[in-house]
Amino acid sequence: MERAVLAAAIDRSAALAMRLHMIGDPRTERRHGLAVARRAGLVCLSSTTMPDDLFTRALGYGTFAPATQRQIDAALRHYTALRLPTRFELMHGAVGRAEVRRLERSGFREEKGARQVHVLELARAPRPGETGELRLERVKRAEAVRYAKLASRGFGSKGPIGLLFERGWIRQLRSGRHATAFIGYAGRVQAATGVLVMDGSAAGLYSGSVLPRFRGRGFQNAMIRARVRYGYARGFRLFYAMSEPEHASARNVRDEGFETRFEIRHYVREPD
C-alpha cells in the first residue's frame, strides 16, 4: 500500500477510536466539555476541562485532509471560539517538512513528546501462533463492564481520564459495531486484555495490558497474535498499533512482524 494511503487509513481509524471514547455519554460530555467536529476535512477533538494533547487536537492534516492554509485557518477559528489552544497532530513520515513549515509560519511550535506508529501489512494468512499457558476468550457484550474494569487495572488507570476510557470501552463493546475485545486467562485467572478496533481498511490494536503479576511471560505477544488472526479472518490486511518510543509495547509488536513506519508529533498555538 502506498505510504500516503496507508497513513490516511491509519489516521482515519485513530480518529474514529478517539471519537468513540469521547462521544456517547451525555453526562461525561457535559462534565468535560467534550466535542468532536469536522472542519475543512479535519477531525477536531476538544475538551474544555482537559485541553491537553490527548483530548484537544486536530487530526488528519496531510493524511485524510489537505495540509493547506485553509485547514490551519479553519482549526484556528474553531479552537479560538472554544478558547482552547489549537493543536495539530502530525504523522511524520507521511507529512513533509513543507507542511510543518506552513504551521510554523502560522505561529505553531512543536511540543515535547512523540508516539510511534507500528504497521503490519499481510499478504497471506498469519501462521497460527502458540499461546503457551494463556487461554484467550472473546468478550461478549454482556461482559463489557468486566472487561473495562480489568483493562483499567492492567493500565493502573485512575482519575477522570481512566474513568472516561473505562466508560468508553463499555459503550463500544456493548454496541458491538467497531470494537472486539479479548481477555487472556492464566489458568482460571484473568491476566491480559486487548481490543481490535476495525473500520474501513485498517484495524487498530488498543487496550493491550497485562496485569503486573503476569508480566514477562509473553502474554502480550499472544494477545497481539490473536487480534491479528481475528482481524485477518474478517478481511483486514492492514493493522497498526501505537506506543511511546521504544516502550516494551513497541518491542512486542515488532516481535510479531510490525514495522515502525511513522512518528506522531504535536504542534500547538496558544489562544491569543
Image: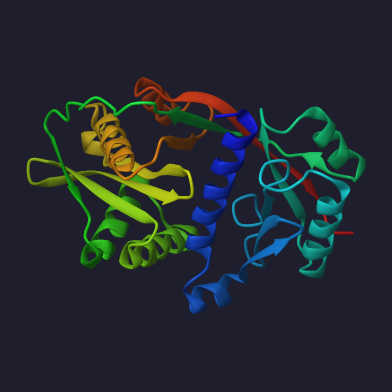
Q: In the rendering, at what x and y percent does residue 72 appear?
A: 83, 51
Q: How many labels sit on residues?
A: 0
- 206 vs 181, left or right, is right
- 180 vs 120, left or right, is left
Q: In the rendering, at what x and y percent does residue 271 appear?
A: 84, 58
Rendered position, 99 above or below 59: above
Q: In the rendering, at what x and y percent does residue 225 appear?
A: 28, 32
Rendered position, 126 above or below 50: above
Quarter of the figure that contains the N terminus: top right
Residue 132 is drawn in which quadrant?
top left
Rendered position, 172 above or below 223: below
- 166 vs 220, left or right, is right
Residue 44 is drawn in which quadrant?
bottom right
Identified at 65% across, 53% down, the residue is 52
Identified at 49% across, 30% down, the residue is 118
Viewer-proximal residue among 248 and 196:
196
